Amino acid sequence: MPLRLTNFKAVGLDTTPDEIFVDASGNVAATPAEGAETLDLNGAYLSPGWCDLHVHVWHGGTDISVRASEAGRPTGVTAMADAGSAGEASFHGLREYVIDPASETIKAFLNIGSIGLVACNRVPELIDWRSIDIDRTLAVIEANRDVICGIKVRASGVIVGSWGITPAKIAKRVAEMVNLPLMVHVGEPPPLIDEVFELLTPGDIVTHCFNGKAAGSIRDTAALFQMAQDMAARGILMDIGHGGASFNFKTARDSIADGLRPFSISTDLHQHSMAKPVYDMATTISKLLAVGLSFEDCLEATTNAPRSVLGLSGANGLASGIRADFTVFDLEDAEIDVMDSQGNHMVMGRVFEPRLTVLGDDAKPASRRLPPET
């Protein structure tokens, strides 16, 4: 049904109209369509649709993935990227059963390990050279160029063991061959984080950028932090990737205070992080706000920045003819106790509260998952 959106504050968009019209095809229109349903947004913010650059939604195909709906529109997210749940051996299932039927826009980083996260960490996807099939990986990429947005490698000791930096090198070479970015998970060595950093070029993504793991954090030494700042300045993208083990309040607070702002805010939502400490995108954005990221930077890192990686509309989303894709939300005062991935606590004074998503001519209510107010 055509829509007419009224009574909102447009943010993160090139223009700030009083009303938005969506036609029966789901595209933004210059004039209202006959019979349009009017939605009064009660003075809430309206932004480009929230975009989560790191989720795990290959539900049933891995032992950690949640359903796409649990990461998506019910919590305010209209677009997401599955971050390596599937390798070449199972990507066809992720596409057929998750990506294609989803209400949300879903793209994927293809795991360089053929088996992906089928038995996450219990059976690492990068044990030795038999774990990677370059020819099959290249074939899957070429057959799915419309939805594969990059290559994913988990470059930390629990995954690669004594194989060290080699899987990351192979993943980077494959990414170069297909002209796609590399998303690299950093954490406990081997390899060392500076070994990983030396491989990366503009457009590549460091996920878990504010983790607090000893010998795996950008705050381990002054030289490492300077290296991270230099990388960000030349176009290497720092992504939050909160997850169950990869976000630390102090690392984030100190890094932001010292001038390093994340490119994108993502949840790394999965079965072992959704109940706590992550909950959802809204809570994750609110944590970044609480540790010192401005409202404007939080918004950019949740909308236009990650949407640009996925080739989606952003600040231009009010231009006539573009598919409508918006999140409606409030910023409310609250006292909510939350944890980082190491069990450190913090009380948030303000929280993002999603109210509605609009995708095409379809509007659906949205809300923040717990934690409850204290």
Image (cartoon, helix red, strand yellow):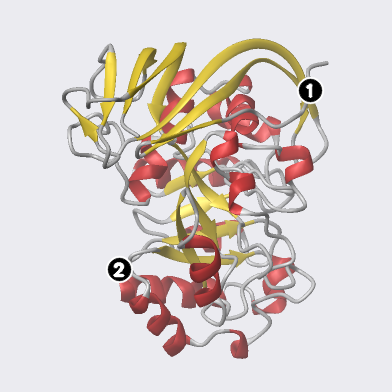
Q: Which residue is mark 2?
A: 179
Q: Are marks 2 and 1 in contact (CB under 8 Å)?
A: no
x, y (%) of residue 302? Answer: 47, 35
Q: Is residue 112 visible?
A: no
Question: At x 62% / y 28%, what residue is drawn?
Answer: 367
Quadrant location, the N terminus? top left
Quadrant location, the C terminus? top right
Q: Which mark is residue 64?
A: none
Quadrant in the rendering for residue 359: top left
Q: Is residue 208 left or right of residue 148?
A: right
Give the camera-side residue of 75 and 55. 75
Q: Is residue 138 visible?
A: yes
Question: Does dot 2 land on a helix, a strand or a loop?
Answer: loop
Q: Residues within 10 Å of mark 2 (few under 14, many from 20)?
A: few
Q: Which mark is residue 372?
A: 1
Which residue extends farthest front? 35
Question: Does dot 1 land on a helix, a strand or a loop?
Answer: loop
Mark before the other along the chain sequence, 2 or 1? 2
Quadrant in the rendering for residue 190: bottom right
Question: At x 37% / y 72%, what residue is drawn?
Answer: 144
Give the camera-side residue of 361 and 165. 361
x, y (%) of residue 328? Answer: 46, 24
Please state which amino acid type lies under the numbered disc 1: Pro
x, y (%) of residue 199? Answer: 44, 64
Q: Is residue 14 left or right of residue 156?
A: left
Please state which amino acid type lies under the numbered disc 2: Asn
Question: At x 57% / y 32%, what residue is drawn?
Answer: 255
Residue 101 vs 113, above or below: the answer is above
CA gap between label 2 and label 1 equals 44 Å
Give the camera-side residue of 196 and 71. 71
The total number of labels drawn is: 2
x, y (%) of residue 210? Answer: 61, 41
